[in-house]
Image (cartoon, helix red, strand yellow):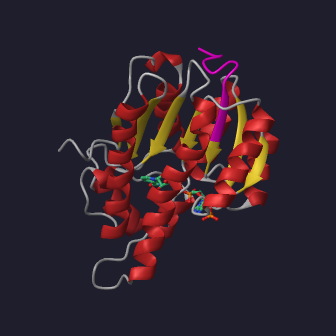
Amino acid sequence: MSGRLEGRKILITGAGSGIGRETARLFAREGAKLALLDRDAAEAEKTAKETGGSFHQIDVTDEAKVAQVVGEAADALGGIDGVLNSAGILTMKTMDDIGVEEFRRVVDVNLTGTFLVCHAALPWLRKEPKAAIVNIASAQALLPSLTGSAYAAAKAGVMMFSKSIAKELAPDVRVNVICPGATETPMTDQGVAADDVAGRKALADIYAMKRLAQPHEIANGILFLMSEEASAVTGVALPIDNGRTFH
Ligand code: NAP
């Protein structure tokens, strides 16, 4: 199939790396016009060159900057009918070694950043008949254990925020959330280095399928939820986690 996002106008945060970048590639192949947002403007620009989108530097925790950049993205796209919040940061620190500053930062980027982008995009989304938001939580939101508590708590917040606004925004805007398991991206390298063979095997062994996901496998789920194939789907948290959270 192709053209599943033909004519759509979609903003992606975290578009300069990992899942956000891979989803941008897939969305472009499916016909969407894209605005690509990231803290790292140079990386967002690379994604933009590949996909034909516009790129915008953003810190999703900065309310004024988010409002400004979402407005610029809407101008570039001619409106907004889709938002993917993929910007996020990881911490592996536990209660014994995390300080309040880092705890706040993890909640701020993952949860408050998701809120700010959704909030700023809402006036445009509400004008569009196919409007949809997809947020990225984590399998840690469903079954914590692999990362630090701050990350798990922030992602559980993203999941419940998404379900909650799915109710508030229906029937105007569909809102769904993906809960990925460990996926081969720079973020996972940060947790367990790619060349740490024993560490990577121990990580893979946690999953029923005994492997990590590839970014395109997460992107496929995001595409479904963003497209009209999911026109009757809202408020869903979809795990794409190689079978960790069902067992
Ligand atoms: P990634 O490769 O690290 O990409 C995340 C992107 O978000 C990076 O480009 C990062 O920029 C950007 N970002 C971070 N803080 C930002 C901020 N304040 N404002 C704007 N952009 C910011 O990670 P990923 O694996 O693709 O993760 C994408 C999403 O999936 C995240 O929400 C993550 O928590 C979630 N997730 C990932 C996994 C996994 O195993 N990879 C599993 C479950 C959930 P910098 O590089 O400058 O930090």
Residue occupying the point 54% across, 38% down: 216
Asked whether the viewer can see residue 192, the reply is no
Residue 8 inside the magenta-drawn segment: yes
Q: Percent from the top left, x then y, of residue 26?
A: 63, 32
- The residue closer to the viewer here, 149 or 26, is 149
Q: Is residue 32 left or right of residue 137?
A: right
Q: Quadrant of ligand 1?
A: bottom right
Range of magenta residues: 1-11
Query: How many discs appear?
Result: 0
Residue occupying the point 52% across, 57% down: 113
Occupied quadrant, residue 87:
bottom right
Q: Percent from the top left, x then y, of residue 78?
A: 77, 29
- The residue closer to the viewer here, 74 or 11, is 74
Q: Percent from the top left, x then y, of residue 39?
A: 67, 61
Q: Is residue 82 left or right of residue 55?
A: left
Q: Percent from the top left, x then y, of residue 97?
A: 34, 85
Image height of 46 relative to 233, above or below: below
Residue occupying the point 35% across, 32% down: 167
Image height of 107 relative to 7, above or below: below
Image height of 91 relative to 31, above or below: below
Residue 231 inside the magenta-drawn segment: no
Occupied quadrant, residue 104:
bottom left
Residue occupying the point 41% across, 26% down: 170
- The residue closer to the viewer here, 183 or 201, is 183
> The N terminus lies in which quarter of the figure?
top right
Occupied quadrant, residue 230:
top left
> The C terminus lies in which quarter of the figure?
top left
Asked whether the viewer can see residue 133, the reply is yes
Q: Is residue 195 left or right of residue 65?
A: left
Dominant secondary structure, magenta? loop
